[in-house]
Image (cartoon, helix red, strand yellow):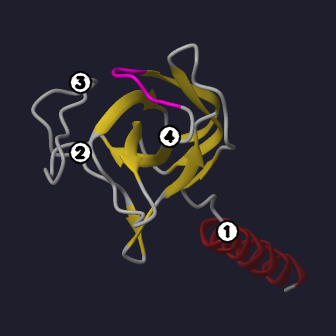
Amino acid sequence: MKMKTTLIALALSVTATGVFAAAHAMAPSVEAADQSVENGVVSADKITAGENGWLVVHRTDAEMAPGPVVGYAPLRKGENMDVAAILQEDVASGDMLMLMVHSEAGGMKTGVFEYTLGAKEDGPIRIDDKLVMTVITAK
């Protein structure tokens, strides 16, 4: 009887640990600070992604709506540190940039960034209907 009780306790412990871990899995996020973009690159200090995807750099302004894409970089599922996106057009000091996590889903080719503003291919990730992003100002 003691062995059966021990096995039941062990099974419950393993189940509880799995549920706890799933409930506390790392939520997608973007961490970045205002920075110089003189070298044609914008970086995020840390990005947590729930799946393979993209860091996408959009222009934005005081309205905080995502504008045209000015750069992107691939992301791996999990934590990504010091992610650098090469800017594809000039960004001036004072410009606001929205660094956003996009999915790899919906496109025709894996590993090729296919998003255009408003498209579903490689589109933005949303958690509780909110974009996973942060806004920085170029210095």
- Residue extent of the magenta highlight: 87-92
Q: Amino acid at mark 1?
A: His
Q: Which residue is mark 4?
A: 77
Q: Is residue 91 magenta?
A: yes
Q: Is residue 136 magenta?
A: no
Q: Which residue is mark 2?
A: 105
Q: Nearer the viewer, residue 26 or 74?
A: 74
Distance (Cα) linking label 2 and label 3: 11 Å
Residue 52 x, y percent position in the rendering: 41, 38
Distance (Cα) linking label 4 and label 2: 13 Å
Which numbered tag is attached to residue 112? 3
Q: Amino acid at mark 2?
A: Ala
Decide: few, some or many residues near mark 2? Use Cα within 10 Å; few <14, some 14-19, many ≥20. some
Distance (Cα) linking label 3 and label 1: 31 Å
Which residue is depicted at the point 72% across and 79% down?
12
Residue 49 x, y percent position in the rendering: 51, 47
Q: Amino acid at mark 3?
A: Val
Of mark 1 and mark 2, the one earlier in the sequence is: 1
Q: Which residue is mark 1?
A: 24
Of mark 1 and mark 4, the one earlier in the sequence is: 1
Residue 96 x, y percent position in the rendering: 50, 47
